[in-house]
Amino acid sequence: MHSHASRVIDGEISYFQEIQRDECMQMFKSGYAYIAGTAMQNLPKNSTFSTPVTFTGSVNLDGKCKGNSYSDPYKHWNDVLVQGFVEIYLSDYYATINLNFKKIQLRSGTSC
């Protein structure tokens, strides 16, 4: 068995993708998300859902790769195959709201 990975400079990164409130509420209500061409169904509440995703490029059954262009918030690459994981955590809990300052205090301590 043979496998290999060819990496580009700054090619490994992990970050949070912010989403709009309406998109979040839709995921919460329907249990469905569509990210990077991948449909995710039956998203559980109060636990983590993780799935592998090919963001760009492709691999055929013979293991041959075909690259494509890819951009994320930090950089742009050409002729690459980008694979990774999408993790979604939908949390259902009560939070403290300060109506005077229009802020919500999350369990994590984050205030927004």
Image (cartoon, helix red, strand yellow):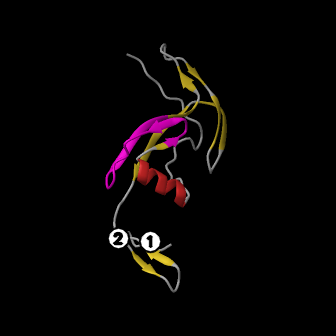
Q: Is residue 24 above or below residue 93?
A: above
* Residue 83 x/y as whole percent: 50, 34
Q: Which residues are magenta?
A: 34-53
Seen at 52% across and 47% down, the residue is: 13
The quarter holding residue 105 reads bottom left
Q: Is residue 67 above or below residue 25?
A: above
Judge left or right: residue 57 versus residue 2: right
* Residue 97 x/y as whole percent: 43, 78
- Where disc 2 sits, the SS reads loop
Query: Which residue is identified by label 2?
Result: 94
Examine the rendering and report whether any part of residue 18 can be seen. Answer: no
Task: Identify the residue at the far left of this view.
Answer: 47
The N terminus: image quadrant: top left
Seen at 34% across and 66% down, the residue is: 93
Seen at 48% across and 56% down, the residue is: 24
The quarter holding residue 49 reads top left
C-beta proximity under 8 Å, tags 1 and 2: no
Give the numbered dot on residue 110: 1
The first of marks 1 and 2 along the sequence is 2
| Crowdedness near tag 2: few (<14), some (14–19) or many (≥20) residues, C-alpha within 10 Å | few
Q: Is residue 98 above or below residue 23?
A: below
* Residue 107 x/y as whole percent: 36, 70
Amino acid type assigned to the residue bearing label 1 in the image: Thr
